[in-house]
Image (spheres, helix red, strand yellow):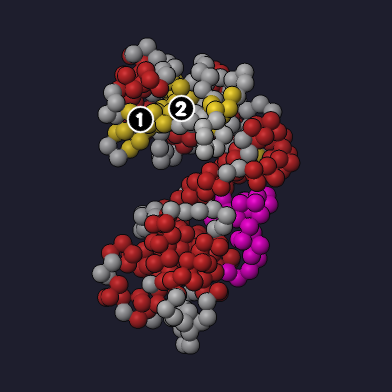
Amino acid sequence: MPIRHKIAQHVVEIIESLQKAGFESYLVGGAVRDLLLGLEPKDYDISTAATPEQIRHLFGKRNVMIIGKRFRLVHYYHGHDIVEISTFRKKPAKLEPVITPGKTLVFHDNSFGTSYEDAFRRDFTINAIFYDPVKNQIIDHCGQGMNDLEGGIVRTIGDPAERFIEDPVRILRALKLVGQYGFRISPETEKALIEKMPLIASCSHSRLSLELEKILKKTSSDKTLKILYEYNFLSYFLPYIHHDWDTPECKDMLRLLELRNARVDNGIYRNSLSLSVATMAFPFVCSALEKAENSPLWKYHPKIEKDIRHVVLNLFSPHSFPKRLIFSAVSAIMFQTALLRDSRRMSRHPTRYQHAVELQEILKLTGIINSP
């Protein structure tokens, strides 16, 4: 498929430079999947035969940073863009723990291998398709990736139960693919996914919080949340929302989130994570706070910001977001009362004002707040 013209030129140049230096290199992962689906990738990952040190030597220290403990990767900086470059890996004979005083136990997993071995270490067949933009060539080492992509099937590579035991976060990633693309899960993968779902409780909150951020940045977040609920994954992932799923607050949350996502897709709003958080939390804030007379909103009191923050943090528990993100989301919610009274005063805070205005627009469009 002729997809090279859709790829950012600097990504093609990185791969071409690696190949000219004698290192087999491909575009991999979600970028290839999205390109083949006719979508624009949000980021690009490259996999290569070059080690992190060889990549840094080739491109220079100014452009390259080696990161990671368990997986050593390279971040290539091109302006504001970051291209992730990994070295082909094979399944290690044994994962050896490295213990650092005062630190968490870390397993190093840097057994470098071939592109063929690397493909079979990936999670799903549709994520194991490699693309060489220099030769304009698709490489499907697993043999099922292209067929599964055309059929919209999420299938693990190898034994599904074993792959989910290796990394239970793959359960969430499988469900995200269903929510984002409308794919279906193969029967054997679905069976193992349901059986191994309790293992998600053993995953670190920090990893799951990052996955939640990725979900909320997508304009398919409302659909993904519905899939997570259908599979009972939400009870592990967002227990508060799972418990309140059939309440009016949750129904309003999904309506607001769907409208916010549609406006981002149509270029009306920029894709703000804090607005997504505020959108989800608003109905629960309204329900939790004492309502003011003759107003759809709450009664003001000096500790209102603290009360709103408590609702927001509780809603997304046990996950944690950066303090700046929470502050921005809480501000967008808190300033709704000020917008209804006098929007001119709010305009002194440009970013917070914009988020608050966007939130109020979708509140009015859904009828949660009546237009004047």
Disc 1, SS: strand
Residue at figure coordinates x 63%, y 57% from the top left: 239
In x, y percent, where is residue 344?
Answer: 27, 75
Quadrant for residue 62, please give it: top left
Q: Residue furthest front?
A: 101
Quadrant for residue 65, please give it: top left
Three-letter amino acid code at the position of disc 2: Arg
Residue at figure coordinates x 44%, y 80% from the top left: 301
**319 is within the stretch colored magenta:** no
Camera-side residue: 347 or 174? 347
Where is mark 2, residue-wise?
A: 72
**248 is within the stretch colored magenta:** yes
Magenta-tinted stretch: 220-249
Where is mark 1, residue-wise?
A: 65
In x, y percent, where is residue 289?
Answer: 52, 76
Quadrant where the C terminus is found in the figure: bottom left
> Which is more N-terminal, label 1 or label 2?
1
Q: Around disc 1, counting alpha carbons within 10 Å, would you say few (fewer than 14), some (14 to 19), or many (20 or more)?
A: some
Q: Is residue 64 left or right of residue 144?
A: left
Residue at figure coordinates x 35%, y 81% from the top left: 341
Camera-side residue: 2 or 175? 175
